[in-house]
Image: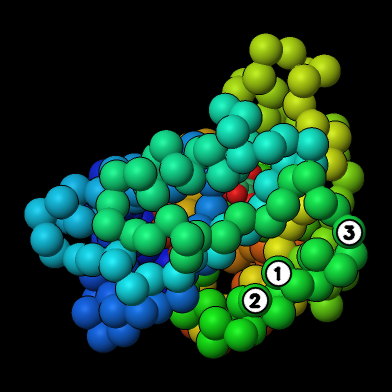
Amino acid sequence: MKIFIGTQEEIAKKAAQRYVDLLKEKPNAILGHATGSTPLGLYAELIKLNKEGALTYKDVTSFNLDEYVGLDGSHDQSYRYFMNENLFNHIDIDLAKTFVPSGLDTSAETAANYDKAIEAAGGIDLQLLGIGNNGHIGFNEPNTPFGSCTHMVELTESTRQANKRFFNSIDEVPTHAVTMGIKTIMNAKSIILMAIGSAKAPVIKAIVEGEVTPEIPASVLQLHPNAEIYLDYEAAALLSK
Ligand code: F6R
């Protein structure tokens, strides 16, 4: 895994450059997007670059990692809403080519169709990931099988607590989500994982320097041929070199 360390601004700019390079080479790339606080700096940078004409999303297709069960895309805490608000509504992407798992139809068939749609599009060229304090990627919580495809999951208490900052109370935080599986993520041709802040430092040390184990889902990235990790100084603080 290649690791880049810098200020939040530096890593957002460096990650954005990967998108500029990819979209220059492959304007119709398939991009895997993530939600949460971490990608906001990158998304702001991508919006700026798009407005300046440095990159276009006109032929891009996007697949998001996950969605809360029970939230319709018009709910302001749904991940569809997040993507529209924080990226899609500000760039020249065709909204019809943006996909987020359904939080309302949680059938196994619909989940399997999400993986099929990714495959039919040609596979994800670049998958963006954040990481949970417990090592989750997407909403693949600890001990999710590495062979998992898109599926419905029960969120752990630690994830619900971490995400309650976006809701009025813990009771409003959904208990379940639909997420790309670990296999779906690992099938991406390249992966960028970003982490910001000291709360992520222990898990970053574990995934970079520890063993590959389903107990820490993001550790699987050690097995990916083209995974890059972008860290701010706080998130990198516990790395030994
Ligand atoms: C979001 C996602 C999650 C987040 C992770 C970190 O689509 O799949 O894995 O990336 O929970 O969230 P933040 O960035 O808010 O710390």
What whole-number distance in Å separates the C-alpha atoms at marks 2 and 3?
Answer: 15 Å
**Foreground residue, 44 or 240?**
44
Amino acid bearing label 3: Ser
Tag 2 near tag 1, CB within 8 Å: yes
**Residue neighbourhood size for the residue with mark 3, other residues' Cα within 10 Å, grouped as few (<14), some (14–19), many (≥20):** few
In the rendered view, tell whether residue 112 sits above or below residue 75: below
**Residue neighbourhood size for the residue with mark 1, other residues' Cα within 10 Å, grouped as few (<14), some (14–19), many (≥20):** many
Looking at mark 3, is its residue's CB closer than 8 Å to ligand 1? no
From the viewer's perspective, tell me whether residue 4 is left or right of residue 183.
left
Amino acid bearing label 1: Tyr
* Element type where label 3 sits in the image: loop
Q: Which quadrant of the figure shows ligand 1? A: top right
Q: Which residue is mark 3?
A: 107
> Residue at horizontal 56%, vertical 44%?
80
Q: Sequence-wise, which precedes: disc 1 or disc 3?
A: 3
What whole-number distance in Å separates the C-alpha atoms at marks 1 and 3?
Answer: 11 Å
Q: Is residue 72 visible?
A: yes
Q: Is residue 136 visible?
A: no
Looking at mark 1, is its residue's CB closer than 8 Å to ligand 1? no
Q: Residue 76's spot in the image, x, y percent?
A: 57, 28
**Foreground residue, 33 or 197?**
33
> Residue at horizontal 27%, vertical 57%?
92
Q: Sequence-wise, which precedes: disc 2 or disc 3?
A: 3
The extreme top residue here reads 168
Q: Which residue is mark 1?
A: 114
Q: Which residue is mark 2?
A: 117
Amino acid bearing label 2: Ala
Q: Residue 166's spot in the image, x, y percent?
A: 60, 23
Q: Which mark is residue 165?
A: none
From the viewer's perspective, tell me whether residue 241 is left or right of residue 160.
left
In the rendered view, tell whether residue 202 sits above or below residue 170: below
